[in-house]
Image (cartoon, grey):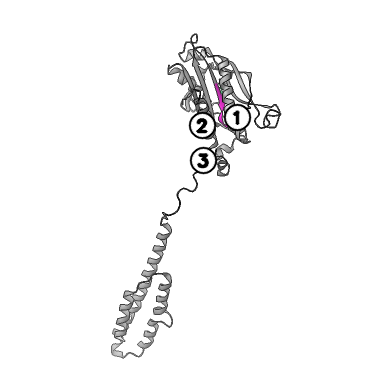
C-alpha cells in the first residue's frame, strides 16, 4: 500500500489539465465516492496497528495533494478564461461606423464655403464680450430700448461683461483692427435669455457678414445675398427685401427667400405667404464706422446676419429647434451623408 500511495503521489504531482472536463475527470477519479482516495481509506481499515500512523499520514498527504491540484487547476482555468475575454481580436475589421457631422456644422460649413468662393474670409471673436463690442459700438445708445431686442445674459456683478447676443460683435473687432478693405463672415455661438421652445433657444448660432470698401452700395449687398440664396437653396430660389430696423445699419432690411417646400404657392412652413425670412442686413451705419475708427466719408459697407438653426430647419425641414441640442443619435444619423 505504501508503494501504491507513493506512485499515486507522483501521478498527482504530474497531472496537468487542459480544460474543465479534464479537471472534473481528475476530481471524480481521485475524490469521487468510488474514487481512488475512498478505496484507499477502505483498505486502511486492514492496515496493521503499528503501521497505521505512518500510513494515515501518507494517505492524508495524498488527499491534500489532490485537493491542492484541483484548486490550482480551477484557478488557472478561470484566470485564463478572463484574459481570453479581454483579448483583442486584431483580425476584426477596423471602424465599422464612422459617424458624421452635426447638421448645424454641415450648414455652417456650407455657408462659409459659399462666401469663400466670392472672396470672403472667416473671422472669429470671443463669446464673452464687453458692452462696447456687443452694443455701444454698434450704435445701441445706453438706455436705448433697442437693447431690449436682445435679452442679455450678463456676467454677475459686472454689467460690462456679457455673453454676446449676436455675432455682430465680431464686426466691431475686425473693423477696429484697422485693415481695409474688409470682406469677412463670422460664424459663432450666441446667447440670449429666452425661454426654450420649438422655435427658440438660449444658445444658438449665427453667421455675420461684413464688407467694407470704397463705393460699396446696397446693390452690391442685394446681388451678394441673391447669389448666396441660390447657392444654398437652389437656382430657382427668389429673394425679396423688406425694410426693417437695426441700430447698426441704415437703411436696414430683412431678406426673404421663396419657400423651398411649396415653391411659393403657400404651405404651413411659409405660413401660406410663399416667403420665408432668413436674414437681416443693411448698409453699415456711419456711426458704427466712426466708432471703430473708419472714415465714413471715404468708406461704406454692408453687413448681414443670419441664424444657422433657422436655415438648417428650412433646408432639412426640421420643425423643432430643440432636436439640434438633444443629440439623439436617431436624429443625427439622418445627416450622416450630408
Ligand atoms: N445681429 C442681428 C441679430 O442678431 C442680425 C443682423 C441684422 C446682423 C442686420 C447684421 C445686420 O449685420 O446688418 O438679430
27 lies left or right of 156: left
Q: Position of residue 316 (x, y in %)?
A: 60, 35
- As drawn, the label of residue 233 is 1
Q: Which residues are magenta?
A: 304-309
13 lies left or right of 326: left
Which quarter of the figure is the N terminus placed in? bottom left
Label 2 and label 3: CA atoms lie apart by: 13 Å
Label 1 and label 3: CA atoms lie apart by: 22 Å
Residue indicated by mark 3:
100
Which comes sooner in the sequence, label 1 or label 3? 3
Whether pointer 1 and pointer 3 mark residues with C-beta atoms closer than 8 Å, the reply is: no
Q: Position of residue 165 (x, y in %)?
A: 53, 26
For image coordinates 41% across by 82% down, the residue present is: 35
* Quarter of the view holding residue 76: bottom left
Which comes sooner in the sequence, label 2 or label 1? 2
> How packed is label 1: few (under 14 Cα within 10 Å), some, or many (20 or more)?
some
Nearer to the camera, 113 or 186: 113
What is the chief secondary structure element of the magenta stretch? strand
Nearer to the camera, 328 or 158: 328
Q: Position of residue 286 (x, y in %)?
A: 52, 12
Label 2 and label 1: CA atoms lie apart by: 15 Å
* Quarter of the view holding residue 327: top right
For image coordinates 61% across by 22% down, the residue present is: 255
Amino acid at each position: 500500500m505504501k508503494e501504491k500511495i507513493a506512485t499515486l503521489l507522483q501521478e498527482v504531482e504530474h497531472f496537468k489539465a487542459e480544460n474543465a472536463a479534464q479537471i472534473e475527470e481528475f476530481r471524480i477519479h481521485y475524490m469521487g465516492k468510488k474514487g481512488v482516495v475512498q478505496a484507499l481509506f477502505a483498505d486502511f481499515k486492514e492496515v496493521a496497528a503499528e503501521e497505521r500512523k505512518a500510513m494515515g499520514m501518507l494517505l492524508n498527504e495524498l488527499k491534500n495533494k489532490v485537493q491542492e491540484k484541483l484548486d490550482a487547476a480551477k484557478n488557472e482555468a478561470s484566470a485564463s478564461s478572463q484574459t481570453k475575454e479581454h483579448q483583442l481580436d486584431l483580425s476584426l475589421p477596423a471602424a465599422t461606423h464612422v459617424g458624421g457631422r452635426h447638421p448645424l456644422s454641415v450648414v455652417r460649413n456650407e455657408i462659409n464655403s459659399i462666401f469663400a468662393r466670392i472672396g470672403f474670409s472667416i473671422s472669429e471673436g470671443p463669446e464673452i464680450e464687453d458692452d462696447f463690442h456687443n452694443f455701444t459700438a454698434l450704435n445701441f445708445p445706453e438706455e436705448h430700448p433697442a437693447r431690449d431686442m436682445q435679452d442679455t445674459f450678463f456676467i454677475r456683478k459686472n454689467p460690462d461683461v456679457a455673453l454676446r447676443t449676436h455675432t455682430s460683435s465680431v464686426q466691431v473687432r475686425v473693423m477696429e483692427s484697422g485693415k481695409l478693405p474688409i470682406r469677412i463672415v463670422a460664424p459663432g455661438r450666441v446667447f440670449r435669455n429666452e425661454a426654450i421652445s420649438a422655435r427658440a433657444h438660449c444658445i444658438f448660432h449665427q453667421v455675420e457678414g461684413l464688407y467694407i470698401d470704397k463705393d460699396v452700395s446696397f446693390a452690391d449687398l442685394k446681388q451678394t445675398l441673391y447669389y448666396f440664396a441660390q447657392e444654398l437653396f437652389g437656382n430657382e430660389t427668389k429673394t425679396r427685401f423688406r425694410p426693417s430696423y437695426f441700430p447698426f445699419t441704415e437703411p436696414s432690411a430683412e431678406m426673404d427667400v421663396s419657400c423651398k417646400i411649396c415653391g411659393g404657392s403657400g404651405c404651413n412652413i411659409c405660413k401660406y405667404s410663399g416667403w420665408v425670412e432668413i436674414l437681416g442686413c443693411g448698409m453699415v451705419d456711419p456711426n458704427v464706422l466712426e466708432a471703430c475708427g473708419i472714415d465714413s466719408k471715404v468708406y461704406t459697407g454692408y453687413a448681414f446676419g443670419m441664424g444657422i438653426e433657422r436655415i438648417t430647419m428650412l433646408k432639412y425641414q426640421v420643425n423643432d429647434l430643440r432636436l439640434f441640442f438633444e443629440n439623439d443619435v436617431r436624429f443625427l444619423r439622418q445627416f450622416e451623408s450630408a
